[in-house]
Image (cartoon, rainbow, N blue to C red):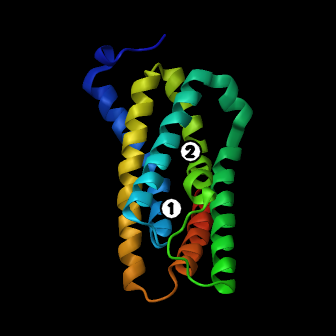
Amino acid sequence: MEKSAGALGDDMILELLVVGFVLSLDNFRASIALGMLPFSRLRAVQVALTFGIWDGVAPLVGILLGRYFGAAMGDIAHYVGPAVMGAYGLYLVVRSLRSEAPEEIDQPLALFGIPLSLSLDNLLAGTSLGLLGFPPVLSAVIFAVLTAVMSFVGLRIGRAIGRLIRIRADLLSGIALVVMAVLLALEF
């Protein structure tokens, strides 16, 4: 049975904030790497919101689908995210070596594929929260907001790093994404 926000009180909110923060760290790290690409401020907001939406939707789906979907998904979620991130990083490296520097990145994978793949672990976390009786909508909103904020901060940090390091931003971002993908894969 689902616990209400009133029944769990401040402890539940604190637990959701901690879990949401920890789950947003992958997106934060990926955002630093992506932030080195030439994004306008509007595109950075769009990317951060997309990261946040996926990180809100994934645990909501996980909570709603419960144990069955979590068991069916297994540990594969921990490998899909890094694999997609690494593939996109390699793509950026190859593209940067073969073309002129872009004025602004407008890749669907950066806007949708990476946030989706990084949210797969949130699907499993949502399943666990559902089994513990956490409210689905409140959990999803907290995770979405935390991830959007962390992603935007990461994009801005990446932009600052990209300005300090004088190599092509798309090459640097690609290398950073590959390194992050390897580190994420090694964590599991």
Q: Residue at the spot x=48%, y=37% of the render?
A: 56
Report x, y in % for residue 105.
54, 68
Is residue 21 in sight in this rendering?
no
Q: Helix or strand or loop: what does disc 2 sit on? A: loop
Q: Looking at this rendering, what residue extends furthest in the top direction?
A: 1
Quick one: label 1 or label 2, which is nearer the N terminus?
1
Vertical side of 105 occupied by 148: above or below = above
Residue wearing tag 2: 119
State left or right for residue 135 relative to residue 71. Answer: left
Q: Can you name the residue that lies furthest to the right here?
A: 72
Q: Residue furthest left?
A: 10
Amino acid identity at mark 2: Ser
Measured from the top left, where is residue 149 in percent x and y?
A: 35, 50
- Which percent across, then down, holds residue 66? 61, 23
Identity of the amino acid at label 1?
Ala
> Tag 1, which secondary structure?
helix
Along the line of sight, the residue nearer the viewer: 43 or 7: 43
Going by the image, does 25 lie left or right of 173? Answer: left
- Alpha-carbon distance for marks 1 and 2? 12 Å
Total of numbered circles in the picture? 2
Residue 128 has which mark? Answer: none
As rendered, which of 138 and 53 lies closer to the eye? 53
Give the residue drawn at x 69%, y 85%.
Answer: 98
**Residue at the spot of label 1:** 30
Q: Quadrant of the C terminus?
A: bottom right
Q: Is residue 45 left or right of residue 26?
A: left
